């Protein structure tokens, strides 16, 4: 076992030196990359992304650059017998956790921009294939960043994907065929909704077509924002529909239950009233009251928009 470990370390050192010489990396980064690879080599199950990511998280407090972490990670994965059997080019694709999440999924979920950059660098010329790798729930890495509201990570991924970034944002996915905009609207991340719409505009895509995409439940991002009590996002989306001259059509889209976005907010408010009548703790009552206030604001915003357009509000 001792000789196997020594041989493995020798392989890593040789690989690192050749890579770093080609890239002109400093001796400090070479040493750091070696330390990263050695730390990762202590993991018994290399294909377990969760264990590998935990080791990377422990390393992020060290003064290692993303470049050094990337080279150490890449060397570790490519000299691992199981992962390298799939070919060095795709070794990162097969390092998953129990939910089929890759290292990048986990990094995006953690909010660590440092590790996101390092892992993306380690992907090398397979980066775009890595960015569109889905986990067991059909989520992409960028979906984890959107769900948690990590705008900087969303920007890093969009910038890295360049002219193919639209393929990360627009296609329907998840079990209910939602888009990135559906996710951002549901979780109330105003800045990310703004960024996604701005990106659609920058890349000359039809904004109305983007905001009016429906999922399997025939719900738009507006339905999701109404359900989550996100008045500002509702206003943003309605304003975009007005600019396109299709606000009436947009506000009249019905989900699979035959409900418009206004109907969804009214239904959710009714549900919160029922919850308020139950015997809940004081903390639960405060949460319910906050939700009621947010939903009332949504109802006010959508109702005002409908009145201005001559649409019924009841």
Image (cartoon, rainbow, N blue to C red):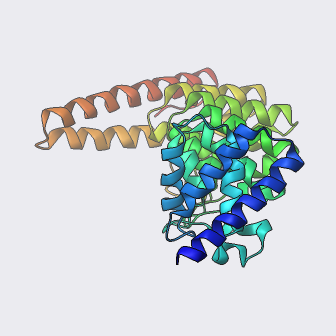
Answer with left or right where residue 178 lies relative to residue 99: right
> How many numbered discs?
0
Q: Going by the picture, which residue comes out furthest to the left?
A: 279
* Res. 93 image quadrant: bottom right
Up-down: is 26 above or below 102? Answer: above
* Res. 189 image quadrant: top right
Q: Position of residue 106 (x, y in %)?
A: 54, 52
> 205 or 240, which is in the foreground?
205
Which residue appears at 79% of the width and 37% of the height? 200
Which residue appears at 61% of the width and 69% of the height? 6
Q: Position of residue 57 (x, y in %)?
A: 50, 46
Up-down: is 243 above or below 258? Answer: above
Which residue appears at 67% of the width and 34% of the height? 248
> 287 or 296, which is in the foreground?
287
Up-down: is 77 above or below 307? Answer: below
- Whether residue 49 is visible to the viewer of this picture, yes or no, is yes
- Whether residue 175 is visible to the viewer of this picture, yes or no, is no
Q: Position of residue 135 (x, y in %)?
A: 59, 64
> 74 or 202, which is in the foreground?
74
Q: Position of residue 3 (x, y in %)?
A: 59, 76
> 113 or 288, which is in the foreground?
113
Answer with left or right where residue 69 lies relative to residue 101: right
């Amino acid at each position: 076992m001792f000789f196997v470990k020594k041989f493995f370390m020798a392989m890593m050192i040789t690989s690192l030196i050749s890579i770093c010489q080609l890239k002109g990396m400093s001796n400090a980064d070479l040493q750091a990359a070696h330390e990263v690879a050695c730390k990762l080599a202590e993991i018994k199950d290399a294909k377990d992304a969760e264990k590998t990511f935990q080791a990377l998280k422990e390393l992020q407090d060290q003064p290692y650059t993303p470049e050094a972490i990337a080279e150490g990670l890449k060397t570790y994965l490519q000299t691992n017998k199981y992962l390298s059997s799939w070919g060095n080019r795709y070794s990162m694709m097969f390092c998953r956790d129990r939910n089929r999440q890759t290292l990048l999924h986990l990094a995006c979920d953690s909010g660590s921009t440092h590790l996101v950059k390092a892992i993306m660098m380690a992907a090398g010329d397979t980066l775009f294939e890595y960015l569109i790798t889905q986990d067991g729930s059909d989520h992409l890495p960028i979906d984890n960043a959107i769900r948690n509201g990590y705008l900087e990570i969303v920007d890093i991924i969009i910038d890295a994907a360049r002219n193919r970034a639209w393929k990360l944002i627009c296609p329907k996915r998840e079990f209910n065929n939602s888009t990135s905009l559906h996710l951002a609207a549901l979780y109330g991340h105003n800045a990310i909704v703004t960024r996604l719409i701005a990106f659609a505009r920058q890349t000359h895509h039809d904004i109305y077509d983007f905001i009016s995409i429906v999922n399997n439940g025939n719900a738009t991002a507006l339905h999701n924002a109404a359900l989550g009590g996100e008045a500002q996002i509702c206003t943003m989306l309605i304003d975009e529909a007005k600019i396109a001259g299709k606000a009436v059509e947009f506000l009249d889209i019905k989900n699979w239950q035959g409900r418009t976005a206004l109907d969804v907010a009214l239904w959710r408010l009714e549900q919160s009233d029922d919850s308020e009548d139950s015997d809940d703790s004081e903390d639960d009552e405060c949460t319910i009251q906050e939700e009621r206030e947010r939903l009332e604001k949504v109802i006010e915003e959508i109702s005002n928009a409908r009145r201005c357009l001559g649409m019924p509000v009841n």
